[in-house]
Amino acid sequence: MTALDARAFEQRLDVFLQERSEEARAVRVGEKETSEQAAIVARYADLFTREQLEVLRETEGARDGAEQEAVARLRITCQEGIVEREIVEREDALENALLAARVAWKGEELSLRSAQARLAVEPAYADRDALGAVVLDTSSSFNDERRALLRERHSLESDVTGIAEPVARNEVEKGIKLRPVLGAVDRARVESTPAFTPQRERWLERLLGPDRDATPAHAHMAWIRRLSPLEATYTKERSVAVCVETLRALGFDLAAEKGIRPDLEDRPQKSPRACVIASDPPRVVHLITRAQGGLHDYEAFLHEAGHALHYAGCEPSLPLAFRRLSRDHALTEIYSFLLDSIAQEPGWHAEHFGLAEGDARENADAARFTNALLFRRYSAKLGYELDFWTRFPSDGGTPDGYEERLTAATGIRYPAANHLADMDAGFYSADYLRAWIRAAQLRAHLRREVGVDWWRRPETGARLRDLFREGTRPTTEEIAERIGFGPLDTEPLVAELGAPA
């Protein structure tokens, strides 16, 4: 097979990525019960060869500026494709096995995904503990295959990139150093602990009751994030209408965004985790949620709307490299974190739910608590993952430190058996954390430039549209510089984590 030039490669890659995205969407939303990614990869095998990779490397070296970066993203995608081609059948097999897995619960046979979703709505503490244990046992039974896939992927990536050390390999791809990110978020976590500890005790008392364990199991996290005792206020029936109106106040008419295709239905095999799949931005961007009641429905919708508006708002004339490819996900997560943080504004609760000032502040504080809890979880997760991958070439990956780090940071027990199911690819935890820092900076900027009620001002939407037009081209560090902050300046984040609503 003859290798393509960069332009022809980009055109064919675009079609391939659309097919893979639509397949992933169908499985994710429960329209299909088996994944057929391997067949798609096989049809486009000509894209992912060593010869093609060499052509892209040579082209990248001959370009400069934005053109060089565009080809670099094509080259990184080709590298990933070469690896994926070798392991996609095993990945499909694991995905299909997880989809087929069943959990026995109270006389029912639930799919693993349905059981995971049930944890968010199971009302009794003891029942959540019991169901969580069954879900963990079922999920962790796949750990041998997960670990074998990680080993094979690591070996292939080492060979294709020429970089044997996993952390260094990811740093080259992202264009950043990961240890300084960990240092910044660790300091932010320590500085915000005096405010978090009493907040945690108060909200766990309210959410889990006085008979809870001193260190509740992570099986209760979905219930905690849902803020289930507040469900009567934040019903799933109102979530779409309230979120659409929230976006409209910012100047975004979701119905008029032709590229955004919402999927809000509840299906048994639909993943409980909301997401956006940008199949062909800005023309086709899927916004997928599964409402279950509770404030988290609203936060999840707004979070995914941030992604959807970003991808659907890019200039159609941008090359594929700047419409959907990126070195990491830190940029698009800024906009998601910004929009879901609206639930931390007392005025939003008062305006959309008719709450008195005290109740509005109380419920906004609940949203701030779950945000702080997740930040602490991810900061500890990054530390664990850096250690995991640093020792991976010698020990093949162990759970050492997972339970200890995450439990100490959150006050929620994360069992060691969960360490591989909790392993996102490519240090996504670092992308989240950089976005946490940047979103806090952007909120500080908007309060200063637009006003404290930035979350209901069309001026905010106009500023965001200007950023969305650039697609995935800027880095999150470039956004920090534009708004007057250092890339690891956590002062705005610490101020928010420590401030009452």
Image (cartoon, helix red, strand yellow):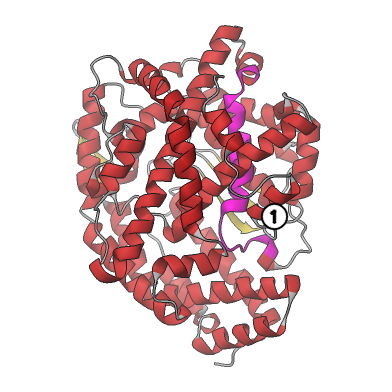
Residue 382 falls left or right of residue 490: left
Q: Residues within 10 Å of mark 1 (few under 14, many from 20)?
A: few
Helix, strand or loop: magenta stretch: helix
Residue 378 lies, in percent from the top left, at: 43, 44
Q: Residue sitting at 55 percent across and 73 percent down?
A: 76
Q: Residue sitting at 43 percent across and 44 percent down?
A: 379
**What is the secondary structure assignment of the residue under circle 1?**
helix
Looking at the rendered image, the quarter that the N terminus falls into is bottom right
In this rendering, is residue 101 above or below 215? Answer: below
Residue 53 lies, in percent from the top left, at: 55, 84
Numbered disc total = 1
Residue 220 lies, in percent from the top left, at: 31, 30
Nearest the viewer among 254 and 161 is: 161
Nearest the viewer among 391 and 288 is: 391
Q: Residue sitting at 75 percent across and 64 percent down?
A: 318
Tell me if residue 342 is in the magenta stretch.
Answer: yes
In this rendering, is residue 15 above or below 225? Answer: below
Tell me if residue 461 is in the magenta stretch.
Answer: no
Can residue 261 be spotted in the picture? no
Residue 196 falls left or right of residue 11: left
* Residue 253 placement: quadrant: top right
Residue 323 lies, in percent from the top left, at: 68, 61
Nearest the viewer among 7 and 161 is: 161
Looking at the rendered image, the quarter that the C terminus falls into is top right
Nearest the viewer among 161 and 143 is: 161
Q: Which residues are magenta?
A: 322-347
**Label 1 sits on what residue type?**
Glu
* Residue 229 placement: quadrant: top left
Can residue 355 be spotted in the picture? yes
Disc 1 marks which residue? 478
